[in-house]
C-alpha cells in the first residue's frame, strides 16, 4: 500500500475562512426556480409557493450567500418585470436559455425565500442590454430607506423596510460571445466603473463584484482582467472568476486533479490583481469571487443537449443541464472546495453553481420528492466544519502523472483550525488502491468524527443518487483512523474524499506539528 504523510504547520495560518466561501447560485434557468425552489401546488409548499422540502435541504447544505438571478439570464433581464402584483407581471422570452419567463418569482419573493433559508443575497445587475440607470434604480428600490419614487414603489409592493442587499455583481461573463450584450474588456471596464461609481453614490455601504473571465481557457484571459482592473479597480471590491471541470476522454487522473487547476487559476488572477493595484498605486484589497464553480459536463450540453433546446419550441422552465453526479464527481467537488479553502487569503467568496436541479447538489421532481446528489455531501460536511482558520500544511506523497496538470500528489489535504478542533479534509486520487496516511499531531487529540465518501459496496466510481435510490452514495465511517503517541494514522479508500474532526488544543504561539 502506498504511503503518504501530512505535516500541519499550526503556527502558520493562511487566513480565516469567510462564511461567504460556502455560497451557491439560483438562476432563472431550467428548473432551478420553477419546480425547483418554487412549486405552489406541491404538498410541501408554503404560503408563498416555495417548497419546504427543498428549503430544508438548502439549510442542511449550509449555503450562506446566493447569487441571483443570473447568470446569462441577467444580461437580458428587466428587473421591473419582477416586482408588483404577480398577476400583472409581464411574461417575457428569455433568449439566454430559449425559455419563457413568467416573472412569478421576483425580487420580493426571492428575498422572502432567502430570509427563510438564512442566506445573504448576492444580486446581479444587467450590464448586457442595460446599464447605469437601471442598476442605480434597482439599488434605490432595494436599499433606500427614505421617501423617493423608487422606495415608495417598494413599499407599495409590500416591503416597508429596505432589503439591505450588500453584494452586487456588475453583469455576468461579459467576455463571452454567448453573452447578451457581449463587450470588449475596455467597453465592459468603462461601463462597470461608471455603473459602480453611481451605485456607490446611491449606497456607499455596498460591495461590488466586477466580471472577470468566464474560464481560464478564454483567449482573452489575463488581458481581460488587466484591462477591467485598469478601468474599475478604484471602484470595485471583488473580481470574479468562473471555473467548471469535467472528465473527458476517460482522463480521470486529470479530472481528479481539477483542484490543482483551480489553484493555478486563482494564483494567476491574484498576481494580476496585485500587479494592477501596484501600477495604479491603490492602497486597497480586491478579493477574488469564484462565483461560479462546479463539475459540469459542458461538452455534452454544447454538443448534445443545447442544439435541440434552442431549435425547439419556447417553454416555461425546460429541463436544462440536470447532470446526475457520481462518486467521482463528489470527490472532485470536495477537492475544489478544498482549493477554495487553501486560497482563503485571496478568495473572498465563492458560489457553487447551481443550487437546485441545474448542475446542482439538490434535485427535485414536480409533485415528487427532493433528494441529495452525491456532491451535496462533501459541501455540507465542509460547510459545517471548516469555519475557522486555514493552516498551512505540507504533503509528502506518491504522485500520479496527468495529461492536463503534470505530476500531482495522490494525496490532497487541507487543514482548518477551529476553537478546540482540528479539521482534516483529505482526498485519495488513486482510483484503484487505498492510501496509508500518517499525520504528526505533536499534541494530544481525540477523533470526534471521521467520514468518507467513496464507491459503495457493490458499486463503482460511477454510482449516483437517484430519485429511486437517493441514498446510494452517502458519507460512511472512516473506520481505520487511530491516534498513538500524537500520530494520527488512517487508510484512505481508493478514489475518496474524507473529513476527520479532532478535539484538539487551540493554536498557541510557536506551536507546530
Image (cartoon, rainbow, N blue to C red):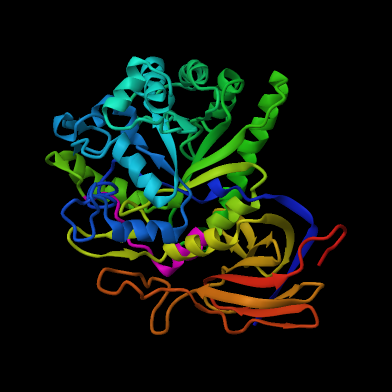
Screen quadrant of the C terminus: bottom right
Q: Residue at x 36, y 49 (%)?
A: 298
Q: Does 331 appear in magenta?
A: yes
In percent of width and height, residue 84 lies at: 23, 29
Residue 489 against residue 159 in the figure, above or below: below
Q: Residue furthest right?
A: 510
Residue 198 against residue 51 in the figure, above or below: above
Horizontal side of 100 relative to 8 (left or right) equals left
Write the start and end of the magenta stretch as one range: 319-334
Quadrant of the rendered structure where residue 349 is?
A: top right
Horizontal side of 224 relative to 399 (left or right) equals left
Residue 54 visible? The answer is yes
In percent of width and height, residue 474 lies at: 43, 74
Quadrant of the rendered structure where residue 276 is?
A: top right
In percent of width and height, residue 227 lies at: 56, 22
Considering depth in this image, is 92 or 298 the residue closer to the camera? 92
Q: Does 232 appear in magenta?
A: no
Amino acid at each position: 500500500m502506498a504511503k503518504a504523510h501530512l505535516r500541519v504547520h499550526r503556527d502558520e495560518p493562511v487566513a480565516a475562512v469567510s462564511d461567504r466561501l460556502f455560497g451557491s447560485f439560483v438562476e432563472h434557468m431550467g428548473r432551478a426556480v420553477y419546480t425547483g425552489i418554487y412549486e405552489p401546488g406541491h404538498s410541501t409548499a408554503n404560503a408563498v409557493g416555495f417548497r419546504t422540502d427543498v428549503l430544508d435541504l438548502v439549510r442542511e447544505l449550509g449555503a450562506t450567500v446566493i447569487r441571483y438571478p443570473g447568470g446569462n439570464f441577467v444580461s437580458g433581464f428587466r428587473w421591473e418585470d419582477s416586482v408588483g402584483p404577480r398577476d400583472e407581471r409581464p411574461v417575457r422570452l428569455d433568449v439566454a436559455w430559449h425559455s419563457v419567463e413568467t416573472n412569478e418569482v421576483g425580487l420580493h419573493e426571492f428575498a422572502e425565500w432567502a430570509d427563510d433559508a438564512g442566506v445573504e443575497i448576492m444580486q446581479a445587475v444587467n450590464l448586457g442590454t442595460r446599464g447605469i440607470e437601471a442598476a442605480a434604480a434597482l439599488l434605490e428600490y432595494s436599499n433606500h430607506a427614505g421617501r423617493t419614487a423608487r422606495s415608495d414603489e417598494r413599499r407599495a409592493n409590500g416591503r416597508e423596510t429596505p432589503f439591505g442587499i450588500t453584494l452586487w455583481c456588475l453583469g455576468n461573463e461579459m467576455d463571452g460571445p454567448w453573452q447578451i450584450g457581449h463587450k470588449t474588456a475596455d467597453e465592459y471596464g468603462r461601463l462597470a466603473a461608471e455603473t459602480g461609481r453611481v451605485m456607490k453614490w446611491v449606497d456607499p455601504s455596498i460591495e461590488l463584484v466586477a466580471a472577470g473571465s468566464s474560464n481560464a481557457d478564454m483567449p482573452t484571459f489575463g488581458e481581460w482582467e488587466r484591462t477591467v482592473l485598469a478601468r474599475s479597480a478604484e471602484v470595485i471590491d471583488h473580481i470574479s472568476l468562473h471555473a467548471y471541470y469535467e472528465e473527458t476522454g476517460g482522463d480521470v487522473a486529470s479530472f481528479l486533479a481539477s483542484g490543482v487547476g483551480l489553484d493555478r487559476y486563482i494564483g494567476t488572477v491574484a498576481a494580476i490583481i496585485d500587479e494592477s493595484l501596484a501600477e495604479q498605486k491603490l492602497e486597497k484589497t480586491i478579493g477574488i469571487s469564484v462565483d461560479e464553480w462546479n463539475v459540469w459536463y459542458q461538452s455534452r450540453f454544447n454538443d448534445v443537449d443545447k442544439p435541440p433546446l434552442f431549435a425547439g419550441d419556447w417553454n416555461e422552465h425546460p429541463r436544462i443541464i440536470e447532470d446526475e453526479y457520481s462518486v467521482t464527481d463528489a470527490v472532485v467537488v470536495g477537492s475544489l472546495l478544498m482549493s477554495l479553502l487553501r486560497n482563503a487569503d485571496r478568495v473572498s467568496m465563492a458560489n457553487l453553481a447551481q443550487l437546485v436541479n441545474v448542475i446542482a447538489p439538490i434535485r427535485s421532481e414536480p409533485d415528487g420528492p427532493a433528494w441529495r446528489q452525491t456532491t451535496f455531501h462533501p459541501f455540507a460536511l465542509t460547510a459545517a466544519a471548516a469555519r475557522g482558520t486555514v493552516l498551512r500544511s505540507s504533503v509528502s506523497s506518491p504522485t500520479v502523472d496527468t495529461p492536463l496538470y503534470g505530476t500531482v500528489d495522490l494525496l490532497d489535504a487541507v487543514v482548518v483550525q477551529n476553537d478546540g478542533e482540528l479539521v482534516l479534509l483529505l482526498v485519495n486520487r488513486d482510483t484503484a488502491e487505498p492510501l496509508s496516511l500518517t499525520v504528526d499531531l505533536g499534541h494530544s487529540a481525540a477523533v470526534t468524527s471521521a467520514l468518507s465518501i467513496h464507491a459503495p459496496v457493490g458499486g463503482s466510481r460511477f454510482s449516483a443518487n437517484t430519485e429511486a435510490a437517493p441514498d446510494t452514495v452517502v458519507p460512511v465511517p472512516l473506520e481505520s483512523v487511530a491516534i498513538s503517541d500524537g500520530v494520527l494514522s488512517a487508510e484512505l479508500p481508493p478514489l475518496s474524499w474524507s473529513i476527520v474532526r479532532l478535539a484538539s488544543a487551540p493554536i498557541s504561539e510557536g506551536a507546530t506539528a
